[in-house]
Image (cartoon, rainbow, N blue to C red):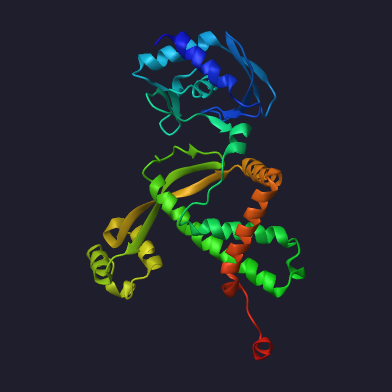
Amino acid sequence: MPFSVSWHTLLDELDDLSDGAELITPLSHDRFRITDVQEHRVVVRFTETGDRRPLQRDQFETLYRRIQETNNKFGLDRLPPDADPYPAVLSLHPRFEIDEQRGTITEQDGETATQLVSDDAETDDTERVEPDGLDVYSDALLLIDALERHHVSDLTELETNALVNLYTLCSDVQRNANEFRQNIADVLLDRLHHDQPVHGQYGSVQRTARRNRSLKDDELVLNAFEAAGIERKRLTTVDANKVDEALDVTELSESDVYEIDKSEYVRKAEVDEEVKESRLQGLKDRLAASEEAETDDLRREIEELEDRIDDLTSFSTGTQMQS
């Protein structure tokens, strides 16, 4: 397909973007917006610095050719300095997609994802649907409502019943969120590589290893040290501190007396608090701008969910029960 066809398809996609649409570069993770679309260039403005920069058509064509020359998959690390806005914009084309995990931009036959962080028009039209079978969603929704209805800046001013409700909801959110987080981590482990952080909208994660060790059977440990010249009476009972001291004066290795295994896990590398605050503010603004009927429905849904846990979060004194 000639580049001119792909170029005009890309321009059409850019023309359809809302004014508030924001993209993110795949390498430096700089945010920017499209401010002008012309026949021979696209003008962008970076959100953080306010710098304005034209992206030329011939540079898009060069990137397009490189992708085709490398079997439709081009390594982003081969880009010239400060060139990563180009693949970010090109990803808005229906056939081009960035894979940050593999560090590539590829041409696909089917529908692809983009580097679009936010699109005000699209967000406004998207209906929020409660996920099925996800307890943490209901708990979090209830907790949000409770936090909005109570002045939690001074907990000592709250009634005991309100504190019981908040404590119960916080406990449920923590438990269910941890369970859900572990399920996510199990899936992420198959997609992460060591020392290669993977970035999302709110932060990033990376794969790392935890080294665990435990002493082998007592008799096995004592025999190993005895063979190495350490008398048994010096290790009447196997103590980890004594074992480590003994290791320092022998040629035994850790594996001779310790069972050592490694476990893989996902740890949080960083959190983008500004993005979280922006997203939360957007949710508040959407709720405030909703139709009155939709707002009433949401409030009723919250109240019904709260009623379902009243038996767990409220209590009666002995006097109340007798009366």
Decide which of 113, 133 is in the foreground and name it: 133
Quarter of the image for residue 32 reads: top right
- Residue 168 placement (x, y as % from top left): 59, 68
At 58% across and 9% down in the image, what residue appears? Answer: 39
Question: Can you say whether 133 is above or below 117 in the image?
Answer: below
Look at the image and tell me in which quarter the C terminus lies: bottom right
Q: Which residue lies furthest to the bottom in this view?
A: 322
- Residue 244 placement (x, y as % from top left): 38, 62
Decide which of 48, 89 is in the foreground and name it: 89
At 52% across and 8% down in the image, what residue appears? Answer: 58
Quarter of the image for residue 146 reads: bottom right
At 63% across and 59% down in the image, what residue appears? Answer: 300
Question: Can you say whether 22 is above or below 235 in the image?
Answer: above
- Residue 4 placement (x, y as % from top left): 47, 8
Decide which of 138, 297 is in the foreground and name it: 297
Look at the image and tell me in which quarter the N terminus lies: top left
Q: Residue furthest front?
A: 293
Q: How many labels does the image show?
A: 0
Q: Can residue 207 be seen in this snapshot?
A: yes
Quarter of the image for residue 118 reads: top right
Question: Can you say whether 123 is above or below 162 in the image?
Answer: above
Q: Can residue 251 be seen in this snapshot?
A: no
